[in-house]
Amino acid sequence: MNAMRELRVEKVVVNIGVGEAGERLVKAEKVLEMVTGQKPVETISKTVNRDLGIRVGMPLGCKVTLRGETAEDFVKRALSIRERRVPVYSFDKEGNMSFGISDYTDFDGMKYDPEIGIFGMDINVVLRRAGNRITQRSLLRRRIPKGHRVERDEAIQFMKDRFEVQVIE
């Protein structure tokens, strides 16, 4: 097979949405750092929602972006919590996959801490082919041609082959 056609995990984004700044956000950051081993970044509100008391620029959650070997290792750990079963609606048409974990204590080596509480997280896996830089570079930026994009069926097959995932209809 052509090396440019092979799929790979470009990045994994782990997100905890708290909905407010303060003590809960600090605890969520601590949880993400324990689970992933990296320092999280705060996610900031871009819109106003008066009903929920959200203003522009207000911190609402935190996230960590993993790449390379650490990303693949984290996906393996997270999928083992889900018993390697993912519903088909977790895949979008661009070949990305998203799923959630309800409690951080499901990870190996994590124990419940009453000071922290229970936090769930969303995990987004981005699959790409080599040659994606064409959309990011500053000179001669181009779109990825239709034949080089990752489609839903290819992403499902990649996850089945690489991570032994069982996709539920």
Image: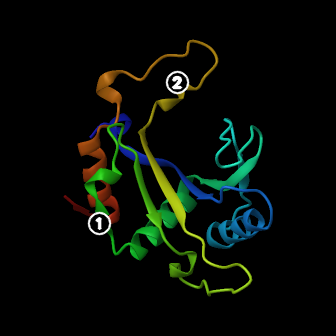
Which image quadrant is residue 95 in? top left
Say which label, 1 or 2, has the lower sequence index: 2
Hey, what amino acid is under mark 2?
Thr
Which residue does the image show at 27% across and 51% down from the upper left?
Answer: 156
- Residue hosting label 1: 164
Which image quadrant is residue 44 in? top right
Relative to residue 26, is residue 43 drawn left or right? Answer: left
Q: Residue 141 appears at what percent x and percent y?
A: 55, 16
Q: Secondary structure at mark 1?
A: loop
- Residue hosting label 2: 135
Q: Neighbour class for label 1 at 10 Å: few (<14), some, many (≥20)?
A: some
Which residue does the image show at 66% across and 35% down from the upper left?
Answer: 47
**The residue positioned farthest toward the top in the image shown:** 140
Q: Residue 1 appears at what percent x and percent y?
A: 26, 41
Please state which of residues 147 and 81 is positioned toward the viewer in this rendering. 81
Please state which of residues 16 and 13 is positioned toward the viewer in this rendering. 16
Hey, what amino acid is under mark 1?
Glu
Which residue does the image show at 48% across and 68% down from the upper left?
Answer: 101
Which residue does the image show at 68% across and 73% down from the upper left?
Answer: 34
Please state which of residues 60 and 83 is positioned toward the viewer in this rendering. 60
Q: Residue 167 appears at what percent x and percent y?
A: 24, 61
Relative to residue 70, is residue 161 drawn left or right? Answer: left
Q: Secondary structure at mark 2?
A: helix
Q: Is residue 49 above or below residue 137?
A: below
Label of residue 142 in the image: none
Q: Is residue 26 above or below residue 10?
A: below
